[in-house]
Amino acid sequence: MGKGAKDAEEEGELDYHVTFPPAISTDVEGEDGQSVPKHEPVVMLFGWAGCADKNLAKYSAIHQSKGYTTIRYTAPRSKIFGNPDSIRDTAYKLLELLFDLGLEENPIIFHVFSNGGSFIYRHIMELLTNGENPQFSNLKVAGSILDSTPSDPRIWTAMKAIFHSRNTPILTTIFLMLMFAVLAILDLVLPKAFRKASSLSTHLQSIEGNPSKKPQLFLYSNVDNLCDYKRVEEVIARRQELGVEVWQVCWNDSEHVAHFLKHKDEYMKKVLDFIKFCVEEQDSS
C-alpha cells in the first residue's frame, strides 16, 4: 500500500488505501434483547484515469465524516488504456479484499468516477451476479454512486480522457495520444473486428443490463464533454425499466468529475442521503 500504483500493480499487488473509523461502540439490541454489533457501511471508491489519491481522498472524507470505512483504488493508466480486459482480475482482488479485511458483513457502497472507475465497477457487478463465485454473492452490497459515468468507451472518448486527465506527465500524455491515434485509424478501417476483441465493446450494455436491483445514484452534467448526459439518461431509463431504484442529479454548469468542486454542499448531502436510504432499505429487507 505504500508503493506507487505502477510498482505495486506490476508485482500483482493492489495499491489501495483503506481508512477505518475510530473504535466507537455501535452495538444495537437484537430481537432476544442481547447486544449485537452494528456494521457500518464500507464505501469503495474507484478513481478516474490519472486520479491522484489525494484527490480521491477528498471524496472519501465525505464518507469518513459519518464514520464509514473507506477503500480507495485507482487503476493504473496502463490497465485502463492499454489492457482493459485485465481489469477483471483487479475487480476479483478488490472483492477478495473485503474478506481479507473482515468487512464481508458490512453494507457495501460503490462510489465510482468516470470510465476509469466504471471499468472496474462493471466487472465487480458481473462477478457479484453471474453465480460463478458463490462467496461473492453473500456480500452485503447496498448501492452504487456513479459520478460522470458511464459513457461510450470509444477510441475518441479515450483520447479526450487522456488529454484532460489530471496529474499525467506530458511525455506519457504524448505517448498515449500517439498510440490512440494509431488505434483510431484501425478502428475506422476494421471497426467490427477491432471492437469485438475487447470487453470495452460491451461496457455500457453490461452496466445498464446488470441483474442487480440495488439502488443507484447518478451524478452528471449536461455540459460534460467526456460523458454524454443523454447516454447516461438512457442507462438510467433502462435501469428503471428493470425495477431499480434510481436517484439522479444533472447539473448544468460543472465539468467532468468536477461536480463536487462546483456543488460541494449539494453533492455531499445527496451522497449521504442516498447511502442512508440504501442502508435502511437493506436493513428492512
Image (cartoon, rainbow, N blue to C red):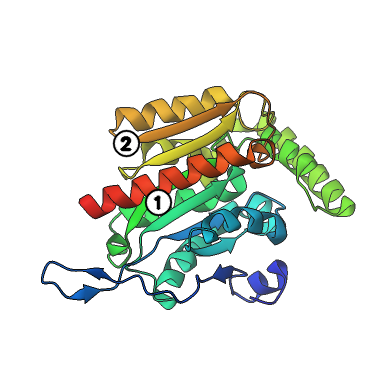
The number of numbered discs placed on residues in the rendered structure image is 2
Q: Of label 1 and label 2, which has the lower sequence position?
A: 1
Which of the 4 quarters of the picture holds residue 140? bottom left
**Extreme residue toward the right, this view:** 171
Residue 124 on image: x %, y %: 43, 55
Residue named by callout 1 = 125
Q: Is residue 122 visible?
A: yes
Which of the 4 quarters of the picture holds residue 244? top left
Q: Is residue 195 left or right of residue 95?
A: right
Looking at the image, is 65 positioned above or below residue 196? below
- Amino acid type, label 2: Val
Q: Is residue 182 visible?
A: no
Residue 123 on image: x %, y %: 46, 53
Q: Residue at x 54, y 48 (%)?
A: 112
Name the mark on residue 244: 2
Q: Is residue 260 left or right of residue 91?
A: right
Name the secondary structure under disc 1: helix
Q: Residue at x 52, y 26 (%)?
A: 231
